Amino acid sequence: MTHDANCIFCKIIAGQIPSRKAYEDEELLAFHDINPWAPVHVLIIPKAHVATLSDTGPEHAAMLGRMLALAPRLMAELGVTNGYRTVINTGPDGGQEVYHLHMHVMGGPRPWLKG
């Protein structure tokens, strides 16, 4: 599994930076965003370092599918019952701030601060 020693999300995966975990298995980690845009805001990340969605290929299809399939399960477990939003920011024009692939999953009563 690839890692980037300078990546904040790789440091979270390694336990060097604390996080409030919502889910973890051998391939994925989900944790609560430290600057939430919604009442419930988690990030789902692969444990392997992939910088952006543009860096994925056919070999990542299963991992991407698992990330997406995890979203409804987490939202249900976290009490979100009236819908949620999934967002993957990609590259500078897409608003990506951390260059480790991550999916925002946001839900809860509106209005939200952003989005």
Image (tube, rainbow, N blue to C red):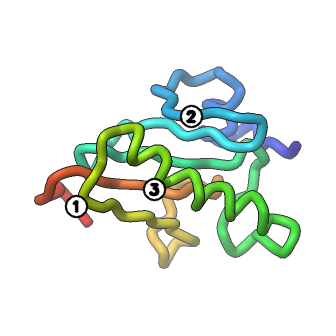
Using a 10 Å C-alpha cutoff, classify the residue at mark 1 as few (fewer than 14 neighbours), some (14 to 19) or many (20 or more).
few
In the image shown, does 58 or 15 lie closer to the viewer? 58
CA gap, disc 2 and disc 3 = 14 Å
Q: Amino acid at mark 2?
A: Tyr
Provide the secondary structure element on which disc 1 rests.
loop
- Circles 2 and 1: CB distance less than 8 Å? no
- The label nearer to you, 2 versus 1, is 2
CA gap, disc 1 and disc 3 = 13 Å
In the image shown, does 82 or 18 lie closer to the viewer? 82
Q: Point out residue 4 in the picture as x, y percentages from the top left corner.
A: 77, 43
In the image shown, does 83 or 97 lie closer to the viewer? 83
Mark drawn on residue 42: none
Image quarter of residue 78:
top left
- Looking at the image, tell me whether mark 2 or mark 1 is earlier in sequence order: 2
Q: Point out residue 53 in the picture as x, y percentages from the top left corner.
A: 66, 69
- The label nearer to you, 2 versus 3, is 2
Q: Amino acid at mark 3?
A: His
User: Which residue is under mark 2?
Assistant: 23
Q: Is 90 drawn above or below residue 114 in the view shown? A: below
Provide the secondary structure element on which disc 3 rests.
strand
User: Which residue is under mark 3?
Assistant: 104
CA gap, disc 2 and disc 1 = 24 Å
Please name the residue shown 74% across and 58% down the image.
Answer: 63
Q: Amino acid at mark 1?
A: Lys
Horizontal relation, residue 81 to residue 52: left or right: left
Using a 10 Å C-alpha cutoff, classify the residue at mark 2 as few (fewer than 14 neighbours), some (14 to 19) or many (20 or more).
some
